[in-house]
Every structure is written in C-alpha cells, then in structure tokens.
C-alpha cells in the first residue's frame, strides 16, 4: 500500500527545512572547500524534498504542485522536526551571520543524518514503489551526509580546547530535540499501519549505537535527556520556523507563478 | 589533543580519473587538514558534476617542480629533434601493423 500523503510531507518538510537552513552558509562557510561541501549537502536535501513534494502533489491530485506544497503552506502545516528549524547560533538566539556556530550546524547534521541513514534504509524496502525509489536515491546521499558530519564531530570534539567546548555545547543544546524522533505522529502511525512506513522506535537502538560510537571517538559526552518533547512534526513549532519560511517563501508569494 | 593545531591547513593537489579516462588527471588543488579530509573535500569540490570515478590527493609539498626560468635550457633543445618522433621513420611493408 502507498504511504499516506501526510507521511510524505513529513519527510519532505524535514528535507526542505534543513536544506534551507544549511544553505544559509552558502558564501559564508568557514573555508571555501567546506562552503562548497555544505552547499552540496543543502542541494541534496532540497532535491530529496522536491521528489517527495512531487510525489505528494501527484497523489493529492487537483491543482497541487511541488511549489504550492513548499511555498504556500503556512508554519503550522509544516511537519518537520523542530531540531531542523533551529538557527545555527547554538543556545544563543539571533540571526547575525557572525553569530553562526559551525559546531551547531555539524552536530545537527550528524544527529539527523544518523537517523536518516536508518529511515531511508528501511524505506528502500517499502512496498510503496515510488517512495522506495526516492529512499534508494536518498540513502546514498544520507550516507555521505552522515560521513561528512561524523568526521567533523570527531575533529571538533577531539580537536582544540575551543572546538571541543563548542562541540559539547552544541551536543548539549541539540540532544533534547532528538527526543522528537521517537514518538510517532499520526502520519507515521498511519504509514506503518499501511505497511509503507517505518516504525521509528525500531530504529532507536541502531541510532544510539551510531551516535554513541562517534561521540565517544570525539571525546564528547552524551547528555541525559528527559522532559519536554518537541512537537514540530505535529505542526507545533519553535519561533524560528516562521522566519525561515518567510525568507524561503517570500519570493514565491510576492510573485506567484513567476518563472526565471 | 596531542598534535598542535595548525594555523593554516596544508595544500593538496587533486587528481581525478574520469569514467572514460585511464589515467588520473590533475584538476586543481585545495586546503585540508589531512589526507582523509582532502579526499572528502576533493569529492565535493571537483566531482560534483560526475567528473570522476577515482580520486588521488597528494601533498603539494611533496611535488618538486622545474623552475620556469630554466624553460629554455630544459625544453627548447627538443624542438628540432624530429627524429625523436616515431612519425620520422617509415615502417617497412613487411612489419605490417604496429
């Protein structure tokens, strides 16, 4: 059976929001080579989002298009993890380019990348053939994203005093948001019930193993997490998503149907 | 945290072998902290448009280059030695295809 459209949108929103967020580094990367690398990662995510939105639009029918799904849905309709919409500034809130912290960017990419390698690996076997094809393509990209991020996590964690301090602060800041991975939403439950999705809870042990191994190699400490579970994938977001969407959707909304 | 941090990352020369190509060709250089990272960076900087199936990276410092000022004495004397090209010789019929 096919995965429900809400499930496709959850996967697509994750990809487009992190792709947009990481693209903020374009032209501002720490060094030229890494600037290009992060741009590649962003484009991979936006490419994944396009495939998923296109599939969702086809299944919705009517006048749905990938652009309408990406540019003309509002904040509360987005189903991405809260983790992915947070700014690059670490625990500090602000938007100044100079305040961006690459350790925060990398740790987020690592925590999410470790999840997506497992999610795409499972979805590659989905009986929903269209979703399985997207998963097969995305899995290769996800493996590279994880490799890239894990490499930097180790370099930062086991690097200088300053890089270690920043990496640990980023881990402490972002880890609580990963709790959202493990509580299925209605869309995820429906996808599992249809036999087309993956039960995220079944991925937790494997995710723990990937994360623990890299953190340990990086001499970083995994914080104890308990308490509040973010609800981005239910449409209840942090204040940061609105600004991100404002920037991403502004052009399309000011000039509907524009082509260039 | 045993090795001291570098102020500048070393430079690496990148060689990429294309799908059709037999040999790795020099395509540029980049900065990276070590060889493993240089390979990653090379993938992102030089093979984004499916240019390659294999990458080599070499520390630029490991390359000894000829001095451009010596160009005359090194290379010009070869200009009039046409007998060094195989096309200078006629191959006897009985040799057949070479």
Image: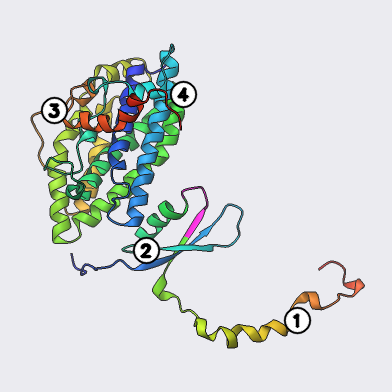
Residue at position x 20%, y 54% in the image: A218
Q: Nearer the viewer, mark 3 or mark 1?
A: 1
Range covered by the magenta-colored residues: B48-55
Residue assigned mark 2? B35
Residue assigned mark 4? A130
Q: Chain of mark 1?
A: B
Relative to B23, A141 lies left or right:
left
Q: Could you tell me which secondary element the residue under label 3 belongs to?
A: loop
Q: How many angstroms separate mark 1 from mark 2 (CA)?
A: 43 Å
- B92 is higher (above) or lower (below) than B34: below
Q: Hey, which quadrant is residue A243 in on the image?
A: top left
**Considering the image in quadrants, where does the C terminus of chain B appear?**
bottom right
Residue A14 place in picture, x, y as percent:
30, 30
Q: Could you tell me which secondary element the residue under label 2 belongs to?
A: helix
Q: Could you tell me which secondary element the residue under label 4 belongs to?
A: helix
Residue B71 place in picture, x, y as percent:
56, 83
Q: Chain of mark 2?
A: B
Relative to B95, A254 lies left or right:
left
Specify whether disc 1 shares its chain with disc 2.
yes
Residue assigned mark 1? B82
Magenta segment includes A164: no
Q: How many angstroms separate mark 3 from mark 4 (CA)?
A: 31 Å
Q: Could you tell me which secondary element the residue under label 1 belongs to?
A: helix
Q: Chain of mark 3?
A: A
**Considering the image in quadrants, where does the N terminus of chain B appear?**
bottom left
């Amino acid at each position: 059976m096919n995965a429900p459209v809400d499930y496709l949108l959850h996967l697509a929103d994750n990809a487009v929001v992190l792709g947009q967020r990481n693209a903020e580094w374009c032209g501002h990367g720490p060094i030229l080579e890494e600037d290009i690398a992060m741009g590649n990662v962003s484009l991979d995510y936006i490419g994944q989002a396009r495939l998923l939105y296109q599939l969702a639009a086809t299944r919705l029918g009517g006048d749905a298009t990938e652009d309408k799904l990406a540019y003309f849905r509002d904040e509360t309709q987005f189903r991405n993890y809260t983790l992915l919409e947070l700014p690059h500034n670490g625990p500090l809130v602000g938007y100044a380019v100079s305040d961006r912290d690459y350790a925060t960017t990398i740790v987020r990419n690592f925590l999410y990348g470790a999840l997506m390698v497992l999610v795409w690996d499972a979805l590659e076997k989905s009986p929903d053939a269209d979703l399985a094809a997207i998963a097969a393509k995305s899995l290769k990209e996800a493996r590279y994203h994880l490799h890239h991020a894990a490499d930097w996590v180790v370099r930062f964690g086991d690097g200088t005093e300053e890089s270690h301090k920043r990496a640990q602060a980023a881990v402490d800041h972002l880890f609580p948001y990963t709790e959202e991975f493990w509580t299925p939403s209605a869309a995820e439950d429906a996808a599992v019930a249809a036999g087309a999705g993956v039960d995220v809870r079944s991925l937790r042990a494997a995710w723990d193993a990937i994360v623990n191994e890299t953190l340990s190699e990086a001499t970083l400490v995994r914080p104890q997490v308990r308490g509040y579970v973010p609800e981005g994938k239910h449409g209840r977001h942090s204040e940061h998503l609105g600004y991100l969407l404002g920037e991403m959707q502004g052009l399309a909304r000011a000039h509907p149907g524009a082509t260039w | 945290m045993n090795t001291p941090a570098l102020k500048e990352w070393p430079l690496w020369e990148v060689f990429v072998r294309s799908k059709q190509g037999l040999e790795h060709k020099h395509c540029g250089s980049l900065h990276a902290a070590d060889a493993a990272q240089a390979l990653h960076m090379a993938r992102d900087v030089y093979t984004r448009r499916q240019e390659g199936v294999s990458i080599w990276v070499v520390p630029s410092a490991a390359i000894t280059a000829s001095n451009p000022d010596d160009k005359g004495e090194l290379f010009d004397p070869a200009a009039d030695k046409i007998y060094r090209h195989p096309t200078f010789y006629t191959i006897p019929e009985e040799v057949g295809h070479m």
